[in-house]
Amino acid sequence: MRPGRTRTIKVDALARVEGEGALRVRVRAGRVEEIQLRIYEPPRFFEALLRGRDFREAVDIVARICGICPWAYQMSAAQAMEDACGVEVSAPLRALRRLVYCGEWIESHALHVYLLHAPDFLGYDSAVDMARDHPEAVQRGLELKKVGNLVMSHVAGRSVHPVNARVGGFYRVPGREELRDLVGPLRRARDLAVETVRWVSTFPFPDFEQQVPYVALRHPTEYPILEGKIASTDGLEIEVQDYDRHFVEVQVPHSNALHSLTRDGRPYGVGPLARFNLNFPGLPEALQSLAREVGTIPPCRNPFRSIVVRSLEMVYACEEALRLVEAWEPPAEPAVPVVPREATGYGCTEAPRGILYHRYRIGADGIIQEARIVPPTSQNQRPMEEDLRAFVQGHLDLPRDELTWRCEQVVRNYDPCISCATHFLRLEVDEG
Amino acid sequence: MNSSSRRVKLAVWKFTSCDGCQLTLLNCEDELLTLAGRVQVAYFLEASRATVRGPYDLSLVEGSITTPEEVQRIREVRQASRYLVTIGACATAGGIQALRNFADVGEFLSVVYARPEHIRTLERSTPIADHVPVDFELRGCPVDRRQLLEVISAFLVGRKPQVATHSVCMECKRRGLVCVLVAGGTACLGPVTQAGCGALCPAIGRGCYGCFGPAESPNTGSLARRWRELGKSPAEVVRAFRTFNAAAPAFQEEGERHASG
């Protein structure tokens, strides 16, 4: 590119992401001048339409925020309602929730690793195109995804918008033998997930490091899914109910979207890299060895390598699901009783894409008065833009088509779920 | 002429929605590659960055219409499509976001948005068929995988899709489930809700909550009376009819009857 020229990279409709977004990068005189990750997915007003609903209805309504990670929404909401009502579910009910969540991680990660992300590394437009040259790999991905969906539907009725989530527990819990049906498929899935880790580790990874701190749940004894304290690589460690004291959302004129920042104005990243960097000791020893063997260990600050971490998390989710299935002893009751009271409740769980925070204020009659939901993709918007800025600045020599594709890949590194993010995004229209 | 140009061109379009119905297509893990061999996936942004220009033989449309831009875009999709099939509660009834239809959308905006004057959204969320002719509507929140495959197969060979329009009760009977409403006294929308899910909720002892919208000739008034006898308040009856298919005419009318009373 000649000096002084203006160059614009535009992707009007980002593909292989969940939801609708566009990308615009403007370069002038060899410097990245403007980065826009524009979200044009229309808002659906979930926080508004939840008001006036019964506190027990939220778990079914918020599932509809996202077809890919509905259980995450259901669990953050259920947790927040139970917190408001001063109730804790029993250990077996918690274990069963974790099992379904493992299914969601497997299903969502397999979708992203194989159908959305891997084609970028191998130079295909889609997994269907990739299947012509790598049929066994795509089959492996589909089989993994199917097992994730099976875990969800076996316990929770269906994988998209499960019907068995309930404040206080479940409507019905499976018997011991019934759950053991999952052992065979999960063992097979675990082997496929290990193959996945080895396969994706052979991909070409650009030399790229990001600087943002990572934020994830951290749990003293396990890899976090359903609970923990909110921790950061900067040394923060807080209770979930203190989230709003440490993180804010700000409106950024150029991006037309709300960005999450720390109170002192810094961006932060959530998701597999954040979990991995903050919770590596929580992974089983064998999995830590596998991570070392493939050369992906903390601190891992290369977002392109998130595909390896997602694959490692799939192995974890399969093994954890197997452990939970084998230890399963059904409780006498599928749910604990929950009586509403006037209170505010907080919930935060690790959705496949990162921490998902819910806060609800309910009345003594159980009616929701206020709702607040912060999805992972909102928190990852600023790091996505920072990555784009740094990546484009460092790769201005690439041909235009190649650079455009790499920019898309930078965004897909985050597995962004734009449908999730948009119910709160502030879309602005330039009416000038 | 190469082989791909003779194959049926399939397109998948997204409007205001959660992605769950498109995902249901990707969740056909055993059939996906076979399907991709039979048809040319010409436009499916969630799955591929490559797009092929229209016209398309079969367009699957997910989502409802909630912005002026979407009003325009669905017309373009219709013009480029030989057959247009809507999939899911958003596309067939306006979805959960149609709850705005019963509220002041300006008030909704101010709850969620700091600067509502900049939001461009319509006052109502409406189904695709309110805007363009639709060849077939597949219900569900989300759609059922087997029904989706049936609809695609039917259009591929040019026959009418076989999708039942009777109520969830029939599915319960077929599965031999004990009626949660009659025997269990649980509030259930099954008698007025279209089949398709396989009676998932009654199977776990829970009342149906209406994902597939109104069944053919639903007696909503009678069911609402039964709910009242079970001790449900008018407000609870309203909320039961106002979820994912709130703007489907039969559910909307029943909701309004109790909202005004």
Image (tube, rainbow, N blue to C red):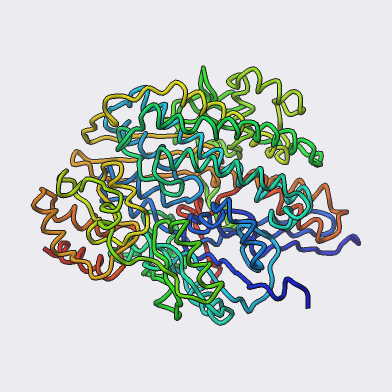
Q: Residue A147, located in which quarter of the rendered image?
A: top right
Q: Where does the N terminus of chain A fall, quadrant-wise? A: bottom right
Nearest the viewer among B16 and B104 is B16
Residue ranking furthest to the right: A2
Q: Position of residue B56 (x, y in %)?
A: 61, 76
Residue occupying the point 35% across, 53% down: B198
Q: Residue B157, located in which quarter of the rendered image?
A: bottom right
Nearest the viewer among A53 and B107 is A53
Task: Report the side of A413 relative to B150 (left or right).
Answer: right
Q: Position of residue A386 (x, y in %)?
A: 69, 45
Say above or below: A367 vs A254. above
Task: Report the side of A399 relative to A106 (left or right).
Answer: right
Nearest the viewer among A89 and A319 is A319
Nearest the viewer among A205 and A380 is A205
Residue occupying the point 50% across, 30% down: A225
Q: Give the number of marks.
A: 0
Does residue B214 appear in the picture of this structure? Answer: yes
Say above or below: A17 vs A310. below
